Amino acid sequence: MQKQTLVMKFGGTSVGSADALVKAAQIVKDARAEYPRVVVITSAMSGVTNLLLDSAALASQGKVDSLPSAESTLREKHFAAADALIKNEHLREVTKAEINVLIFSLVDLCKAIAILGEASPRAMDAVASIGERMCVRLLGAVLQDAGINAKAIESTEFVVTNAHFQHAHPDFKATTEKTRQLLNPLMDAGVVPVTTGFIGATPEGVITTLGRGGSDYSAAVIGSVLPADDVWIWTDVDGVMTTDPRIVKDAVTLPEITYSEIAELAYYGAKVLHPKTIRPVVDAGIGLRICNTFNPTHPGTRLIANAPSDSKARNGQVVKAVTAIRNQRLVTIEGRGMLGVPGVAARAFGAVASTKTSVPLITQASSEQSICFAVPSESAASVLNALQAVFASEIEDEDIDRVWMTEDVSIITVVGVGMRHTPGVAGQVFTQLGNNKANVLAIAQGSSEVSISMVVAATDTELAVRSLHELIVK
Ligand code: ADP
Ligand code: ASP
Ligand code: MG
């Protein structure tokens, strides 16, 4: 059957400069030749979301001195690309004027935050959304100027979410209805809708974001509700690689990756794909490809169904990839009085949840005398306070000896579906770390046996990743 609909998402670097935008425009043109219906989703230009959120964070401390410089950085970045690429003067000036209005709204929002002395999650989302909202206008105009019948449209008009600001959940039913209602007539008329990743709106129209790096998720949501045949994630590397090429330069692309492998990789820190991206595409049976805007002829990585024949990667190695999550702390609750006391774990994780912190890793002790888990460093202090409060009487009665945490650590994870059928992988992994003098502080293995995670001191992160990567690429 002929393929009909393609959703393509461009990441921050892929729209981060005039040069990148030229490449993105060519990619859209080429896709149009292959697919009658194409939807383009854009991130903010690289660095913009961080700049916006930093401005809001400073404003919440009453600091607005750096606002003029943020304003001019944003103006220069967007205007330079508009000036270089939009030849039609009217289109160029209209686009710049619209972007300017958004920059003024940032200034207004930051001033309001400074007066209030706090930035609510809702205000942070209003600020963060400006990056994608500026970029969608720029990219839409660049595509139009390149002869593509494109129309910029904000996803706030059709991605409906709950009001969980900064980590909003899409309402798939409402989103399906609105997305089809808005995008189908455009595509039927031969228009390429160009829309914002990362953001949505509550039913009342208040802007939300889906979480940092969430444009990938937007692509999966929009792709699944249309539904599209394929979702292509355009980024700045040749697909999903054996590890982060910023850590190990001889990392290589994995041509294919299974659902469960990519889920583990994304969850355990491979920034190349937001972890929430996988479920909607798998549920809707849509193809997913990750490819490089700067090397578009490279096939990149294709997501495939879990199949035993795909279990071995390069050189027959069962470990296919290594990832790292930095800036974590290991929290331990210990005490001999905990033995056999029911509900300690439930109360502990209840206390953690009350701080809105998620726990990426839990290690299990054979006795019930300690519970140990990882939390992001930024939440560690509030987690510790919450635990000390919930166990105040046990601590006083000395049933719990102490609740403590380590310095910064990293979670290193090796991933590969073939590990499930291969004895001795854990041994190989720990020998490799031991031989390279990387000290393992804690271990966890997922019940699916697709991954093994180890906690190491922050200073051992690169060493651990490099030495485990040698198990894959020798
Ligand atoms: P985008 O802005 O396109 O969404 P991101 O910066 O979010 O791009 O993700 C791409 C980056 O992910 C790459 O530049 C790379 O440094 C990093 N990365 C981490 N782990 C991996 C991996 N296993 N394979 C490929 N890239 C990875
Ligand atoms: N611009 C957003 C961020 O930086 C979303 C994304 O790039 O995926 O988090
Ligand atoms: Mg990303």
Image: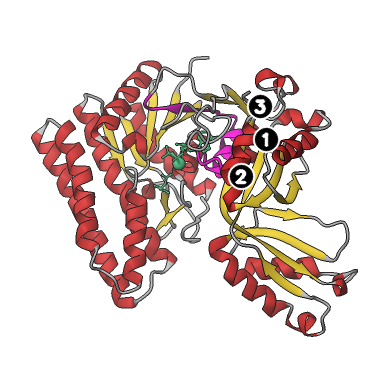
Magenta stretch bounds: 267-294
Q: Earlier in the sequence, mark 1 or mark 2?
A: 2
Q: Earlier in the sequence, mark 3 or mark 2?
A: 2
Characterize the local packing of mark 2: few (<14), some (14-19) or many (20 or more) Cα atoms within 10 angstroms: many
Q: Amino acid at mark 1?
A: Val
Q: Which residue is mark 3?
A: 305
Q: Position of residue 221 (x, y in %)?
A: 50, 41
Residue beneath the point at 70% across and 46% down: 454
Residue beneath the point at 59% across and 46% down: 461
Say above or below: 332 vs 80: below
Whether residue 243 can be seen here:
yes
Q: Are marks 3 and 2 in contact (CB under 8 Å)?
A: no
Q: Amino acid at mark 3?
A: Ala
Colour scheme = secondary structure
Say above or below: 32 vs 389: above
Please identify, in this view, whether the residue under mark 3 or under mark 1 is nearer the observer. Answer: 1
The stretch drawn in magenta includes residue 280 = yes
Residue beneath the point at 38% across and 46% down: 155
Q: Are marks 1 and 2 in contact (CB under 8 Å)?
A: yes
Characterize the local packing of mark 1: few (<14), some (14-19) or many (20 or more) Cα atoms within 10 angstroms: many
Q: Nearer the viewer, residue 413 or 285?
A: 413
User: Is disc 3 placed on a helix, strand or loop?
Assistant: loop
Which dot marks residue 268? 2
Which dot marks residue 278? none
User: Is disc 2 placed on a helix, strand or loop?
Assistant: loop
Please identify, in this view, whether the residue under mark 3 or under mark 2 is nearer the observer. Answer: 2
Q: Position of residue 207 (x, y in %)?
A: 38, 57
Q: Is residue 184 left or right of residue 269?
A: left
Q: Which residue is mark 1?
A: 415
Q: Amino acid at mark 2?
A: Tyr
Q: Position of residue 154 (x, y in %)?
A: 33, 46
